[in-house]
């Protein structure tokens, strides 16, 4: 509402973290190997690494990514396309991470189920069917496989969300970041 009345909203410096990146041209934002137009090009791995590195330095708050280039290189229409493309990239990456996390959780549940099944089969066979020699041979196979499945499944359910959580938070912040193009006079 303050913005509608021409007033600048009060935001503390702690709430917004800026990432300033000097570029020679708009091509620096995108992959060198992708010849498509800016609205479809893949974002540069170098840019993604730099954004990730800068995010680690200052994790809290909202992000403002500033691209600095010479005034004669600026094209407001192209800049709007690039901003849209960057947001689309981070939104797509966020969806991919969520799908991967869902898949890993499902696989974790399957590992636990098969691990428990192997352990139950070995226990049943030992208790009701087996002679001593075949019981020991079967235990050599089923017990390690069962415990491996259980531990791997538990790891996927407990550890993977933490690993993917940081990546998801970064992509959410960059999806909602304010992208600004600034002119710089270079002599």
Image: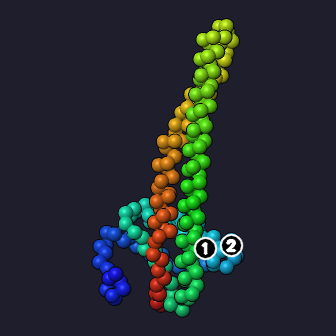
Q: Which mark is residue 110?
A: none
- Vertically, is 95 above or below 147? below
Q: Residues within 10 Å of mark 1 (few under 14, many from 20)?
A: many
SS class of the residue under badge 2? loop
Image location (x, y in percent) of residue 23: 53, 79
Residue 158 in sight in this render: yes
The residue indicated by pointer 2 is 34
User: Percent x, y for residue 40?
Assistant: 65, 74
Name the spot of residue 17 as percent of width and height, x first: 38, 70
- Pick the front one: 54 or 39: 39
Image spot of residue 105 (x, y percent): 56, 44
Residue drawn at the location 60% of the way across and 35% of the way down: 111
186 horizontally vs 43: left or right: left
Residue at 48% in and 64% down: 172
Q: Nearer the viewer, residue 68 or 98?
A: 98
Q: Are marks 2 and 1 in contact (CB under 8 Å)?
A: yes
Picture disc at residue 30: 1
Distance CA(mark 2)–CA(mark 1): 8 Å
């Amino acid at each position: 509402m303050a913005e509608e009345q021409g007033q600048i909203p009060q935001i503390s410096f702690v709430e917004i973290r800026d990432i300033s990146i000097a570029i020679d041209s708009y091509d620096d934002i995108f992959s060198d190997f992708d010849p498509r137009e800016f609205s479809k090009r893949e974002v540069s791995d170098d840019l993604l690494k730099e954004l990730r590195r800068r995010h680690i330095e200052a994790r809290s708050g909202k992000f403002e990514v500033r691209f600095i280039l010479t005034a004669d290189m600026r094209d407001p229409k192209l800049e709007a396309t690039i901003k849209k493309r960057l947001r689309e990239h981070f939104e797509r990456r966020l969806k991919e991470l969520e799908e991967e996390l869902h898949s890993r959780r499902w696989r974790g549940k399957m590992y636990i189920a098969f691990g428990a099944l192997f352990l139950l089969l070995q226990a049943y066979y030992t208790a009701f069917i087996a002679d001593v020699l075949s019981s020991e041979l079967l235990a050599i196979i089923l017990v390690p496989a069962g415990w491996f499945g259980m531990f791997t499944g538990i790891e996927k359910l407990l550890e993977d969300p933490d690993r993917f959580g940081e990546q998801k938070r970064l992509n959410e912040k960059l999806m909602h970041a304010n992208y600004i193009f600034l002119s710089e006079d270079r002599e």
